[in-house]
Each structure stands twice: as C-alpha cells, then as structure tokens.
Image (cartoon, grey):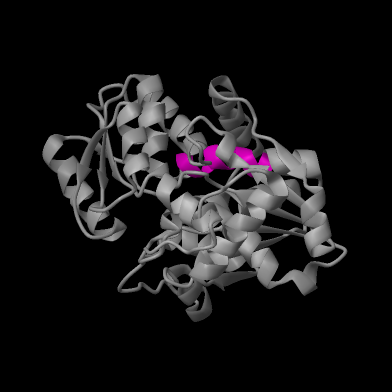
Amino acid sequence: MELTADALANARRIVEAAMAPTPQYAWPLLAEEFGAEVWVKHESATPTGAFKVRGGLVYAERLARERPEVAGLASATTGNHGQSLAYAGRAAGVPVTIVVPHGNSVEKNAAMRGFGAELIEHGADFQEAREFSIGLAADRGLEMVPPFHPDLVAGVATYPAELFAAAGELDAVFVPVGMGSGIVATILVRDLLGLSTEVIGVVSENAPAVARSFAAGEPVGTETSRTFADGVATRSVDPVAFDIVRRGASRIVTIAEDDIAAAMRLAYRATHTLPCGAGSLGLAALTAERDRWVGKRVGVTFTSSNIDTDKAALVLSGGTPAA
C-alpha cells in the first residue's frame, strides 16, 4: 500500500467538504508534566467524536461515484468505525448495517442508530461480530467494509497531515492501534513528507495482538481482547497493516488498564477534554516513557472521546472500568 500526494490531496478535499480540520495544540500543562513540547491532535472534535469518520467519508464518496449499484454497506465495530460508516453512508445515500458484540457501548450504539445505521448485536467480542457480519453481508448482497482498507487509510491520513502541517516535524508521535488505519496512515504521511519522526504504536495489555505480532515479526492472534479501551479491543492483526507497521513503527508500547484510566484523568486536567480509553493510549505511553522525551517535541492523538457516561464518571472519580 502506498499513499501518493495526489491521493492525500483528494482525500483532504473530500473530508474538508464534510467537516472542518480538527485542532491541534501544544498544551502548557502537558509541557510542565513531561518537560517536553507535547502537541495533542483533537480527533474527538470530528462529527462522530472519533478520527475514523475521515476514512468513512472517503470510502463512501468513492462508492457513490464508482459503484452506485451497491445496495448497501455492512461491517462490524465496537463503535467508532460503525459511526464513521453510518455518518458517511447517510451523506452518500447508502444504507448501512452494522454488527456490534453483545454488551457493546450503549451510547455508541445509540449514536450509530442516530446516524441512520441498522444495528445488529451478535457475539461476545469484536472478532465474533466481524465473522458474523461477513456472512450477513453475503446473505443480504451488501458490500462488506473491512476495518482496514486503502480508502479508509487515505481518509484517516488527513489527520496526521493536519498535525504535521501545524506542528512541523516532531521527534515522535504516539498512536493507539486497533486494526491499524491510524498508525498506518501516520507512517505513510510521515514517509510522504520525508520526516524522521518516530511513530510509536500503543495497545492495551489486555488486547496485545499487535504488540505480540510486532515482537514475533509475524501476525499473532490472541484468545481475548477484554479491555475497557474498546477502540483497540482486537484479537487479530490485518496482514497488510501489520507489514507496514512492522517496517515503519519503531515499537509498540503495552499499557495496563489502570494506567489508561490515569491518562484519561491527566488529559482532563491538562487539556480540559476527556478522550476515551483508546483515545488516551498515546498519552499513557508518553507517561510510561517520560524520561526519554524530556526536551523533545512529541505528538499524541486523542483519537476518540466516545465513552459511556457511567464509565467516564468512574474514571474521573479515580476508578478503572471493567472490560
């Protein structure tokens, strides 16, 4: 997979027609905390509260332009990917069916329905929901949208492009990793711009498939992915995404659940915003590596703020939600 300047420019045209660029700030309280210049990319400011809407907009635009005969889209999600497709599908006039696991975020489910998606609950986790959604798409004659796809990556790439345009070359960026569109997009934009920025992936220790794969040098699955940071709750690794991550990321940092919650609280104190568990992973990794980055310029992305109210309240009161 490659990202050309023309493809990025086209993706920016599509995304900017639907939403304003999200802000990025070098927060002074984070500078005090880490002794570093810390830029935060606020992807929670998108219309769906998460970065993935950018990919959905590019995917749906090409679908409407090149494949108008498609009856509808289907996919699986724990929330942000589904909201992205629901939002973009509504804009493009394409019906969207989303499968979520049982026990999924009540508020994310409501948001997907609010954007017009048909929502189906199946399975104990994302992997089981995804396997069911593939059969459902075949049965209904729908186009199955995978969690990782070149059009999704091109759309997502618009956010690191905005970050680097505003902040310039950074010493490192920390990127939460689920199925890989965010970190792959960051790597591809860095390389397209000819920057030397380290790209560091971050996962929950309860969903370590990417970390284990990176250590092994080949895709490795896990039996479970029970983390309250549900945006990265995956048990498998996309092989195309993994190949790019293996070659382009410096390492994958694994973060404990309590440390994810602590990073959420730090984000709230220092930036007056509350990213979700997955959205706080970059800040959690920076906290874990704080001595390495003193005097440097680093970036973290608050990839999403989509967390149920009761879990957010528990975190802010000092607790850690159960998976």
The verdict on residue 159 being magenta is yes
User: In front here: 322 or 123?
Assistant: 322
Q: At 28% from the left edge and 31% from the top edge, which residue is drawn?
A: 117
Q: Nearer the viewer, residue 17 or 321?
A: 321
Residue 203 vertical placement versus 75 (above, below): below
Regarding residue 294, the answer to whether it shows in the image is yes
Q: Is residue 229 magenta?
A: no
Front residue of 193/297: it is: 297
x and y, in percent, of residue 85 in the image: 38, 34
- The structure residue drawn at horizontal position 29% and vertical position 43%, both measured from the top left corner, is 75
Look at the image and give the residue range highlighted in magenta: 151-161
Q: Quadrant of the C terminus?
A: bottom left
Pick out the residue farthest to the bottom. 216
> In the current view of this chain or complex, which residue is farthest to the front?
317
Tell me where residue 302 appears, x and y as whole percent. 60, 48
Residue 182 at x, y percent in the picture = 54, 50
Q: In x, y percent, where is residue 93?
A: 33, 19
116 on left or right of 91: left
Image-based side of 130 in relation to 17, left or right: left
